[in-house]
Image: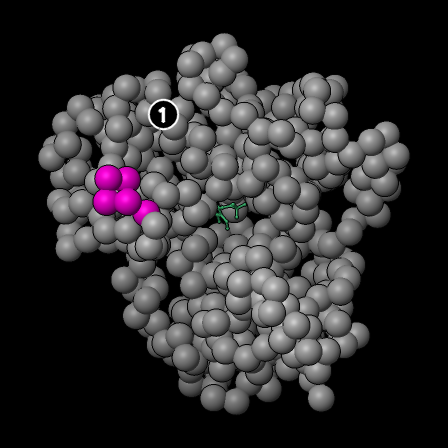
Amino acid sequence: MLYQRSSALFSEAQKYIPGGVNSPVRAFKSVGGVPVFMQSAKGAYLTDADGRQYIDYINSWGPAILGHTHPKVLEDVQKQAENGFSFGTPTELETEIAKLIVENVPNIDEIRMVNSGTEACMSAVRLARGFTGRDKIIKFEGCYHGHSDAFLIKAGSGAATFGNPSSPGVTQGTAMDTLLAQFNDIEQVRDLFRLNEGEIAAVIVEPVAGNMGCVLPENDFLKHLRKICDENGALLIFDEVMTGFRLAFGGAQEVFGVGADLVTYGKVIGGGLPVGAFAGRREIMEHLAPNGGVYQAGTLSGNPLAMRAGLSTLELIKSDEKIYSRINKTTETLDFEIGKILNSKGIQHRINRKGSMMSIFFHIKSVANFAEAAAANHPLFNNFFHQLLEQGIYLPPSGFETWFISDAIREVEIEKTLEAVQKFEY
Ligand code: PMP
């Protein structure tokens, strides 16, 4: 039987861990069924607790851009571990990784390491507020910036209204300071600035959204955001937790030619260990403690094992920048070939893709914002997901998630994936 041991492990986990998981999406709530418990990962493949192999299109939700357990990263982390796990002091490694990033990413002079994307976004917003002396922020419906209170706000009845908390435990007071707009709707952003003149500290955006499925900025959306922020003395924050070092070494800033005031990172920057970071121009970053008054800290921030995994990963990418053309090409091939197969089966769909991020929306022609992403046929996606899973293809377990293509996925894996899609019964 498939997933036999995963089933047993899930029952056991539920006794001790809320919902049996340490992050909700892992519970397969939206697709249903038993979450697959993984045991090991190498290259393009995951191996589950029953010993079955899967081609991985999640890649730990983005970090494993080189594929899993790259031998060089493994060797470097093992060596580093022999020197100790954590010192709580500065180390040379932290400067090395900071230097590599600052010298190769546009627009940033300084970078501060944290332990997750959530921390990075939360801290960037605090810094933006401290720097501007303003309280409010604008975020976009369907964009996810981690689980800190200010971001867990969903749309109210329109751009002009205040957001409502989308989680119990987030106070109305917090919700009041988070204004919402639809992704790709620049007029709503203009309206919010008009209605809240002099009060908006920052606009935070996923430059390519990956948390409502993959949704691309359209009609120079990012350039317009840049301009509106400049006109209003607000900071533009690019949440590059997904796009950073993935779309290009310089992330979305490089790809779209739009500079942000603050940029947040996660995922690839830690090479699979828990790392996040935020970065910006010196004049802004110098407002952070210990030089400035905006407080931010972390016992394990800049942890040597995590820095080693991140630095080795970034160095490997830097030493072979063809990686981007390879993973982008793989993604393009998957897009075209999967599209062809679905068309031949008469399944209307839309594939959104940027670089090595993509997702499929069923029964909808285009998806440019959350409302459209939500209007796709999600039960059909769930069916697609399960049929592929049974054939050893591991897609993100929700139609609101993005697939992350790694450099370990090559022709053989593409072939196997297409064969599985070919067998999809609608
Ligand atoms: N921002 C974006 C764009 C993300 O995709 C995520 C996580 N998927 C986060 C922030 C939060 O990162 P973390 O889960 O590391 O806290």
- Residue 85 vs 89, above or below: the answer is below
| Range shown magenta | 170-174
Total count of labels: 1
- What residue is disc 1 on? 128
At mark 1, the secondary structure is: helix
Name the quadrant of the N terminus. Answer: bottom right
Q: Quadrant of residue 332?
A: bottom right
| Left or right for 231, reference 24 | left
Q: What x and y, as percent, mark residue 278?
A: 51, 30
Q: Residues within 10 Å of mark 1 (few under 14, many from 20)?
A: many
87 within the magenta span = no
Q: Which colour scheme appears in the figure?
A: one colour
The residue under the point 53% across, 37% down is: 265
Q: Is residue 284 left or right of residue 153?
A: right
Residue 158: % across, % down: 15, 52
Q: Residue furthest top?
A: 291
Q: Residue, x 34% and y 55% (percent of image)?
A: 167
- Where 74 falls versus 55 (above or below)? above
Main structural element of the magenta stretch: helix, strand or loop?
helix
Asked if residue 324 lies left or right of residue 82, the reply is left
Q: Position of residue 274 (x, y in %)?
A: 64, 42
Q: Which amino acid is tagged 1?
A: Ala
Question: Residue drawn at (62%, 29%), measured in percent from left and top?
Answer: 299
Viewer-closest of 56 and 248: 56
